[in-house]
Image (cartoon, rainbow, N blue to C red):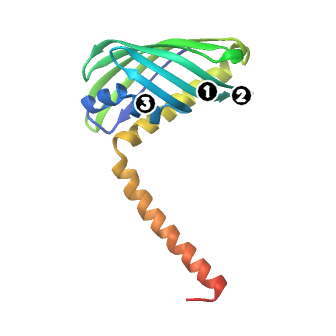
Amino acid sequence: MHMSDQKEIAADPAMVYAALLNPEILKACVPGAKEVTGSPEDGFEATVTQKVGPVKATFKGQVTLSDLVEGEKLTISGEGKGGAAGFAKGGAEVTLTASETGTLLAYDVEAKVGGKLAQLGSRLIDGFAKKMADQFFTNLQNALAPEQDEEEGDASDAAEGEQKKSWLKKITARG
């Protein structure tokens, strides 16, 4: 499977680069991540639970980083085993370029799956991989620029709270 895309992240390249090397941020951003430990120098160990079509598995894997150029690029290589569900392995080249709104992050991924996962068919696997990548970058954006979302969330929560109170007052005839 081959996948390439680019995403605009509203943070400077140094901040995005640092986030990609931080196990706590990775744990928060990788969909289904239960644990991410390690360091950029020694590599990371990750435990991720995912459901792909009818197959649900917990993958335990190793991720190594290479070709590290601070604030500009890195190469990610990894392999995960999911027991009877099979395995996934591959790599990604990631480049970061400063843009008007922050950072343009481009990635080029090459991956292989085996076992039950491989039997699901490439359309299902490709669609799942695209969905996972999109969710990762949405989570990364939220981790790097949470103040925008929190302000919007607080305003809508407050309005929703007022609606609930007025609805409750009508039912209980208080108010």
Between 40 and 98, the one lying in front of the other is 40
Residue 84 percent across, percent down from the top left: 71, 16
Q: CA distance from mark 1 to mark 2?
A: 9 Å
If the image is split into quadrants, where does the N terminus sit?
top right
Q: Are marks 3 and 1 in contact (CB under 8 Å)?
A: no
Q: Are marks 1 and 2 in contact (CB under 8 Å)?
A: yes
Circle 3: residue type: Leu
Q: Secondary structure at mark 1?
A: helix
Label located before the other in sequence (1 or 2): 2
Label located before the other in sequence (3 or 1): 3
Q: Secondary structure at mark 2?
A: loop
Residue 77 percent across, percent down from the top left: 45, 12
Q: Compared with residue 9, is residue 41 higher up or lower down, i.e. above or below?
A: above
Between 162 and 123, the one lying in front of the other is 162
Q: Which residue is mark 1?
A: 128
Between 59 and 149, the one lying in front of the other is 59
- Residue drawn at x 59%, y 83% as measured from the top left: 169
Q: Compared with residue 146, is residue 89 higher up or lower down, i.e. above or below?
A: above
Q: CA distance from mark 2 to mark 3?
A: 24 Å
Q: Are marks 2 and 3 in contact (CB under 8 Å)?
A: no
Residue 80 percent across, percent down from the top left: 56, 15
- Res 41 → quadrant: top left
Q: Residues within 10 Å of mark 1 (few under 14, many from 20)?
A: some
- Residue drawn at x 45%, y 36% as measured from the top left: 28
